[in-house]
Image (cartoon, rainbow, N blue to C red):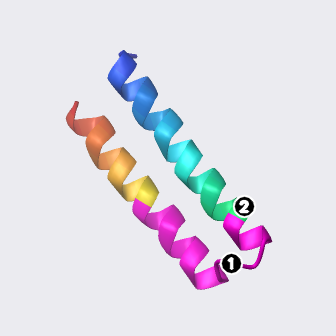
Amino acid sequence: MTETKFGLLLTGAAVIGLAVALHRQRALGRGGLLTVIAATLVTVAAMFLTQ
């Protein structure tokens, strides 16, 4: 695994972690949380597979 792919995985995990933290503080609703998770997974997967 290259450094770029490793960075993508770390960045995706950080974005999802931030969304979960905002959801727990009630700053982000359930729909928003699911949207962030889905968008992050799709983006990371697309970039990971095209590297």
Number of numbered discs: 2
Pick the residue in front: 5 or 49: 5
Question: x, y percentage for residue 10?
Answer: 52, 34
Residue occupying image coordinates x 36% and y 46%:
45
Q: Quadrant of residue 19 in the image?
A: bottom right
Amino acid identity at mark 2:
Ala
Residue occupying image coordinates x 37% and y 27%:
5
Residue 10 belongs to magenta span? no
**Residue that lies at the very extreme toward the right in this rendered image:** 24
Name the image quarter holding the N terminus.
Answer: top left
Q: Quadrant of residue 26 in the image?
A: bottom right
Residue occupying image coordinates x 57% and y 44%:
13
- Mark with earlier residue (2, 1): 2
Q: Main secondary structure of the magenta part?
A: helix
The answer to whether residue 27 is above or below residue 22 is: below
Span of residues in magenta: 22-39
Left or right: 45 in relation to 21: left
Name the image quarter holding the C terminus.
Answer: top left
Residue carrying label 2: 21
Amino acid identity at mark 1:
Ala
The answer to whether residue 48 is above or below residue 16 is: above
Residue occupying image coordinates x 53% and y 63%:
37
Determine which of the numbered discs, if any, sits on residue 4 in the image.
none
SS of the residue at dot 2? helix
**Residue that lies at the very extreme toward the left in this rendered image:** 50
Residue carrying label 1: 27
The answer to whether residue 11 is above or below residue 30 is: above
SS of the residue at dot 1? loop
Question: Separation of disc 2 and disc 1 at Cα?
Answer: 9 Å
